[in-house]
Each structure stands twice: as C-alpha cells, then as structure tokens.
C-alpha cells in the first residue's frame, strides 16, 4: 500500500472518530483506529493478462495478474477477496479450486480461457500470506451480471483483501474490456466455446508473444474441426 493510500485510510478513520465523538457515542481516548492489513498488492503484466469480458449475455468474467507480499514477521491471514467495479451490484465469485487430480481452472461451462492451477492464486484464499513467500499469479472469477452496453475499452477496478477483523488491503488497477462476447448463450448452454486465440480454420495455432515469454502459462482452449468433403 502506498503512502498516499495509507494516509487516505487514516484520514477516513479520523473523520469517523470525530463524528462519533460529536454524537456522544465515543470519547477520543476510547476510539481505536484499526490499521490496514500490511499487504502490498502489485499488478503484473499487460492488457491481455488483466481483462474483464462477457460470458454470454448474462455473465461477466475476469482475470487479473497479481503479486501480493507482506513484511509481517508472522504473516497475514487473508479471509477473502473482493473485486469491485464502478457499477453497482457486481459480486464476483472466485473460480473454484479444481484440485490436484485435474489441475486446470475453467470458467463457467468451459467458456473462455483455461489456466494451469500452478499459475492461479484463487486456492490460496483463505490462507496465510507469509513473509518472503509472495502470492504471484492470476486471480480469476465470474459474476452473474452482464457488463453495461456502454462500458468503455478500459476499466479501473478495486481489489480488496480482507481478514476476519475487518482490516483490508486495497489496490486500484486498470483492466481492459474485451467487448467480444465469449460464447453465445446458445453455445454456453451446449457447454461449448472457442478460446480467445482460436485460429481461423486451416491456420496453425501460434500463441501470442506474451504467452510464449511466460512459457505458455495461460493455455488457450482450441479445437480442430475437419471439413466434410
């Protein structure tokens, strides 16, 4: 958390304390101001690694590449995570942990991209973030609400990591908006979709440069369709 963010959080607590004192609810010496969680949240990668997109006409998906670290000697317990958009009533759920037997994260009904479990941090939450053991990888989730039609090409989202006591670490990050609807409703109902990097029929698949640099950490779902002659 930057010095500016820490100052903003402290200022909010001071203003709340002053209102409580004026209302006679609390005395200044009794007011305890909770500290923010000592976690640094850094966004990694470029646009293709930080995206919000449409899943059919009724759902929204996202992935964001992060590095979360702490200097706390005993580590920091993280109870949960929220991704907040500028639109109301968007409540994202993390993609569920696929486990070790089939270690691939999928979006609902196999729409969109798939991620090897080793590249995702969803299953680390809830959990303890330890010093010198940062969480690095993708956070991915989906929401049962569609993106507004007039949304722009880029959004600022707020990421919140919180504990059981109401303390939180936050960060504001930029993500691109993919306006292509990944999988029509009909195709979602059939649990069938093409990946973002699906080549045109008859063309060889070649991963984008950023994926090749990362050793293909993100695995596009592709399928080959043969022409009937």
Image (spheres, rainbow, N blue to C red):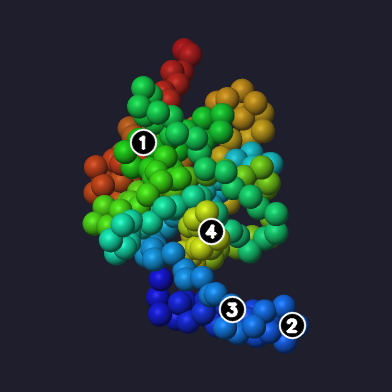
Question: Mark 1 vs mark 2: which is more N-terminal?
Answer: 2
- Which quadrant, please, contains the N terminus? bottom left
Which mark is nearer the camera, 1 or 4? 4
Q: How far apart, in angstroms, are the residues tagged by discs 4 and 2?
A: 24 Å
Q: Which mark is residue 24?
A: 2
Residue at numbered disc 3: 30
Q: How far apart, in angstroms, are the residues tagged by discs 1 and 3?
A: 47 Å
Residue 167 is situated, as x and y percent measured from the top left of the image, at 51, 63
Which mark is nearer the camera, 1 or 2? 2
> Is the C-beta separation of discs 1 and 3 under 8 Å?
no
Question: Mark 3 vs mark 4: which is more N-terminal?
Answer: 3
Q: Which mark is residue 165?
A: 4
Q: How far apart, in angstroms, are the residues tagged by discs 1 and 4?
A: 29 Å
Q: Identify which residue, 170 or 26, lies in the foreground.
A: 26
Q: Identify which residue, 218 or 171, lies in the foreground.
A: 171
Image position of 47 with respect to 97: above or below: below
């Amino acid at each position: 958390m930057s010095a500016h963010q820490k100052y903003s959080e402290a200022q909010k607590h001071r203003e709340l304390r002053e209102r409580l004192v004026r209302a006679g609810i609390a005395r200044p010496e009794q007011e305890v101001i909770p500290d923010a969680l000592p976690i640094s949240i850094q966004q990694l990668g470029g646009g293709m690694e930080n995206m919000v997109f449409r899943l059919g006409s009724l759902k929204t998906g996202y992935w964001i590449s992060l590095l979360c670290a702490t200097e706390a000697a005993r580590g920091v317990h993280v109870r949960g995570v929220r991704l907040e958009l500028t639109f109301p009533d968007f409540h994202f759920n993390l993609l569920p942990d696929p486990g070790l037997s089939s270690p691939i994260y999928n979006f609902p009904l196999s729409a969109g991209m798939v991620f090897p479990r080793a590249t995702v941090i969803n299953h680390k939450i809830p959990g303890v973030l330890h010093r010198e053991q940062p969480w690095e990888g993708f956070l991915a989730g989906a929401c049962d609400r569609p993106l507004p039609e007039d949304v722009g090409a880029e959004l600022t989202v707020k990421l919140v990591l919180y504990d059981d006591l109401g303390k939180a670490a936050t960060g504001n990050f930029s993500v691109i908006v993919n306006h292509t609807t990944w999988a029509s409703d009909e195709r979602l109902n059939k649990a069938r979709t093409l990946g973002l990097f699906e080549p045109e029929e008859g063309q060889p698949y070649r991963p984008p440069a950023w994926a090749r640099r990362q050793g293909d950490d993100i695995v596009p779902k592709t399928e080959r369709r043969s022409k009937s002659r």
